[in-house]
Amino acid sequence: MNRRDVLLSATAAAIGRYAGAQEAPKSAHIGFIVTGETFPHRRFDEAMRRLGLDRGTQSHRRASGDRRGPGAAQIAANPDVIVAAGLIDALPVHASTRTIPIVVIGGTDLVEEGLAARARQAGGNVTGVVVLLGELDGKRLELLRELVPAATRISFLAYAGNPRSIPRATAIEALARPLGMRVTARGLSGAWELETAFATSAADHDQAMMVQLSPLTHENLPRVVALAAQYRLPVIYEFREFVEGGGLLSYGQVWRENFERAAVLVDKILKGAKPADLPVEQPTRFELVLNLKTAAALGLTIPPSILARADEVIE
């Protein structure tokens, strides 16, 4: 058992003790809205079962890039609580109801987006778990610099459907300059642009890439990883599943904890708590995951400094 498993087991045990402290309602109607792929819904249900809180959820899936609301039927069903996989799911739901409690699993800044009044107490019908994505980009650039010291040209594979992608790309460019790196943002509107983005990056002699986590990149995870291998690009991801699927390395928060914390928030609401009184939770742990087989295929020698800091090494 590695240190990540030990810490996650301790977290689950602590949450499990809380879950058993109060009597749960016998039945509940939980709605779930997700854009693109079904991974967040599956992981949320797994977290509910893992913590002994399973009550079943009804899913409403939107296609990547769909800007429409969750649909009248989703709100008319009047669930006890709606779980939104991310910010782009939460915004249209919030526009449709200010009374049904909403828990966001992967919101970037719920206060800045107007979904919550404050972090300590959400102050409305929305609460959830914040994700840190752009805040960790400086660290990801430093990891690329350690891994590929000669890299001066970097691609940032961004999702055009996320309004935060452009300002994030600008911020990455600013972070890269002191490191002697030049960053080029390559926006994706759909899966059909993936091949072109990688081919263009290779033609422009980019020496490494950062991939933004999005519904588009995650639902096309095998293809993203395969294209990185095809064009021999060292890529850093935000989510460990890309590395488990053959990607080079990832650095980001421990996503399993996001689902568990969201499950606990849902449980508290079902037991009578109001979202307005619950805090918007922040991630507390981050993990570095490395795939040695992929590094060898790319002809990369992993510096001891990265190996020593890795939370998990896949061989």
Image: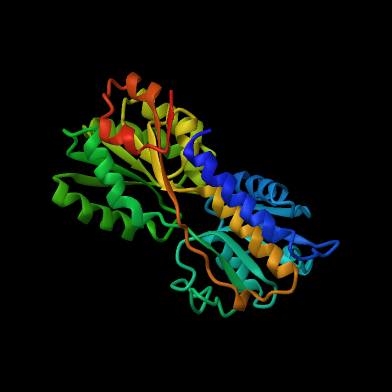
Estimate the x, y position of residue 219 in percent, counting from the top left.
54, 40
Residue at the (49%, 77%) spot, across then down:
118
* The quadrant where residue 99 appears: bottom right
Tell me if residue 138 comes above or below residue 269 in the rendering: above
Estimate the x, y position of residue 82 in percent, counting from the top left.
68, 64
Tell me if residue 35 comes above or below residue 280 in the rendering: above
Estimate the x, y position of residue 263 in percent, counting from the top left.
65, 57
**Towards the viewer: 94 or 261:** 261
For residue 71, say whether it is visible. Answer: no
Estimate the x, y position of residue 187 in percent, counting from the top left.
36, 47
Tell me if residue 275 comes above or below residue 164 in the rendering: below
* The quadrant where residue 38 appears: top right
Tell me if residue 118 comes above or below residue 44 in the rendering: below
Residue at the (17%, 39%) spot, across then down:
152
**Towards the viewer: 302 or 309:** 309
Q: Is residue 208 left or right of residue 133?
A: left
